[in-house]
Image (cartoon, helix red, strand yellow):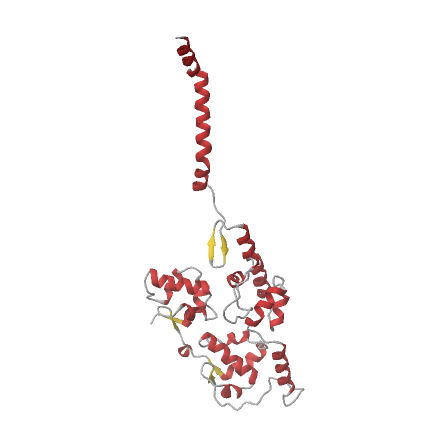
Amino acid sequence: MKEKDWDKDWLYFTKRARRGVFVLLTLFIIIAIFPRFYDNYFYKPIAYKVGDIVTENPSKEIVEKNHKQYVIPEKPFNPNTIDKEGWVRIGLSEKQAQMIINYLKSGAILKTKSDVKKLYPITDELYNLLEPMIDLPTTRHKEEFAQYENNTESKKESPISIKNNLLIPISINTATEEELLQVKGIGPFFAREIIKLRDAYGGLISLNQLLTIYKMDKERLDLISPMLIVNESEIKKININSASLERLKRHPLITIDMAKSLVYYREHEHPFKTVDEIMLTPYIDKKVYLEIKPYLTVD
């Protein structure tokens, strides 16, 4: 009997002890479920982009590697026209990309490849990687233009003073190089660059687009404008319902993100009924829409 009584005494919990056990169990349950509750309702993970993959919990090695990795554009690009998202895709931070955009908006123009090295966020390493894809003249190209200037009939005359054999204006979107050479103010260099520019866009909708050409300034543009006609009906438009991703992103005004969003929308929602519907996709606001609308069609 005594042994049994001893067992009862050992297993017996006082009211105070039971209360203590209840408090401990409550704390244990709270500690166990709190991390999951926090993750589900309060925690906002930071997303990291590793290459083309966005992950919330990359390893330290992956993050460090990603910070050092640059993505070189697959096609030549003009650093004067690339947008902020384009610089970020190359590998710059948003702050660095915005610095470049602000610098160019101040009126600065990058005229040669080496000018890109003057941009503060561009390191020597990044410039060496980008240089083959920068769509700007090299030093040799500058010398070629200087030689052209020196070969004008009179050194006292402006290089714009070139003979004009044309009697009527010509279409800038269909003119041959020989026809362009007959325009007062257009020499071999500008004739080639104009054709190169219009081919990239599929045609020009404004003569002001010529100002993106190296050495083209307002004075020269005013001189050649009377002999050039812009006809939007000659634009080679892109069918956004059938054009491939590669075809879309080759256009100077369409970034890769814009191209992907257009393809995704037509494949997962429905084919575009009008060009206006592109504003339903990400990355395309009203300003971008007005710029690219003349180059797109749904037919």
What residue do we see at 60% from left, 67% from top? 127
- Which residue is depicted at the point 50% across and 78% down? 196
- Residue 143 occupies which quadrant of the picture? bottom right
Q: How far across and how far down the image is residue 79, in percent?
A: 56, 68
Q: Position of residue 69 (x, y in %)?
A: 55, 60
Left-right relation of 242 to 60: left
Q: How many marks?
A: 0
Q: In front: 132, or 141? A: 132
Q: Quadrant of the C terminus?
A: bottom left
Residue drawn at x 65%, y 89% as measured from the top left: 154
- Image location (x, y in percent) of residue 207: 50, 77
State whether residue 13 appears in this view: no
Quadrant holding the N terminus: top left
**Left or right, 158 with reference to 270:** right
Nearest the viewer among 232 and 259 is 259
Q: Is residue 7 visible?
A: yes
Q: Among all residues in the image, which is located at the extreme right?
A: 156
